Amino acid sequence: MTADFPPAFSRRRFLGGAGVGLSSVAFSHLLGSESLSVQRSHFPAKAKRVIWLFMHGGPSHVDLLDPKPELIKHAGKPLPESFGAVETRRKVAHNPLLGPVKPFRPRGQSGIEISDFLPHMAELADEMCVIRSCHGDSVNHPQSVYQMNTGSILMGKPSLGSWVAYGLGSENQNMPSFVVMPDPGGGLKGGPPAWGNGFLPATYQGTTMRPGANPILHLQSASERSPARQRATLDLVNQFNAMHQAQRGADSHLEARIRAYELAFRMQSAAPDAVDISEESAATQTLYGLDDPTTREFGTRCLLARRMIERGVRFVQLYSGDTNGWDAHEDVLKNHTEYCARTDKPVAGLIRDLKQRGLLEDTLVIWGGEFGRMPMSEKGVGRDHNPWGYSTVFFGAGVKHGHVHGATDDVGLRAVQDKVHVHDLHATILHLLGMDHESLTYRHNGRDERLTDVAGHVVKGILT
């Protein structure tokens, strides 16, 4: 079969014909922009977009962002009985306490104490909003990764990025609304469902991208077809898909496939341009650490994140950490020295670059993992998982700068003051994007589902 059908046999005429029998709703979807259109927010937004720097494995808050003098004082001793029973992943509740492995120092005019592990981020203390009272519901990686991404410890719910794409749409028809750049080492605990669409239409799932000439696998045509020839072929495929959909009623997967074909065609030129960093100045590349083999990989992805949001991508998520990543069971000093060295300068470079370009004022940047680490030792110099109290950092749009919110107890075991559950984090992120977390719903199995389920409160104490 040839794709050279007569020009008069256009897809608009074909799909609009009475014989196809598409409902008016489906018809408008397919004949519209064929991408995620811009949606209206619930109220004026402080942030237009989000960059989420996800430190997979669980960075240790008590070694990075949450100084605990009492932990130094009682290092080598068991946790006092006054703290009560503690659920741990590897039965470390009765192990000796381990003091912070690097010193903390007051930074900037705000005086926020930050560890020597993060010298570059520490220089940006006056840009930070450090939430020291985060907590979740599981001591296991996959469940906590799912919860931090989807609000649920169970696999299969829509991710935050998918909810944002669903709620706000896209600012650029040639690029996805939600882009994910996994760690090239792979092995995320929980895998791709962490950026999946769940029960939302499949078109809202995250699009994985990577640096290089081929940023999206299988995007480029293997043949030498001209753009016009590809366009004609795609039109014919879409016509058959539309007929198939019309015979079967609503099918989000089929509609997503139609949209995906359209988006892929447009991205063949847009995506390579987005990842082409050759036009970036030497000073910019140095700012992100591209001149250093240690920081080059993560720095490149941070630079790409900036280029993505400049091109209208709403939600960009970067993962640092392979199968184990920041999971410092064996040796906190060794593990965090490695991962901080890889990420600290690129993160600081990203914040500086966004600020000097005027992008930080309406971009929310998030730094954090799925949980923190226990104050008790594991194997002498390591730490176990701790979902009961940990830190997350916000930069940019709509949040206080040089600010600390909440607190954990004297040894960093549990959040105790102005506690912020994962649902609260999500409610706050949506709020900054102009969306009410209670109003952003999707009807599924007879229930109005939402990211925050039946919980969640906006953390007003961090808002400007």
Image: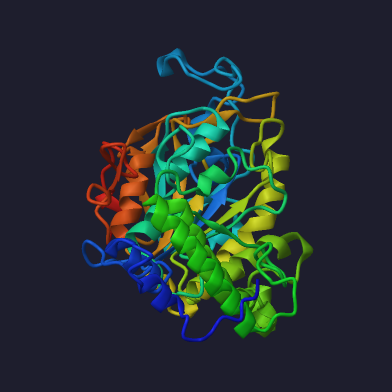
Depicted 151 relative to depicted 288: above or below: above
Depth check, front residue: 77 or 197: 197
Query: From the image, which quarter does the N terminus lie in?
Result: bottom right
Q: In which quarter of the view is residue 415 placed?
A: top left
Q: In which quarter of the view is residue 303 placed?
A: bottom right
Name the residue furthest right: 293
Depth check, front residue: 191 or 218: 218
Name the residue furthest front: 19
Residue visible at 74% across and 71% down?
A: 222
Residue 140 x, y percent position in the rendering = 55, 29
Residue visible at 52% across and 51% down?
A: 114
Is residue 307 in sight in this rendering? no
Query: From the image, which quarter does the C terminus lie in?
Result: bottom left
Residue 180 x, y percent position in the rendering = 56, 57
Residue visible at 64% across and 73% down?
A: 275
Residue 420 x, y percent position in the rendering = 34, 40
Depicted 147 relative to depicted 301: above or below: above
Q: How is the image coloured?
A: rainbow
Is residue 341 in sight in this rendering? yes
Residue 109 x, y percent position in the rendering = 42, 63
Q: Is residue 22 left or right of residue 158?
A: left
Number of marks drawn: 0
Depth check, front residue: 100 or 463: 463
Depicted 7 relative to depicted 213: above or below: below
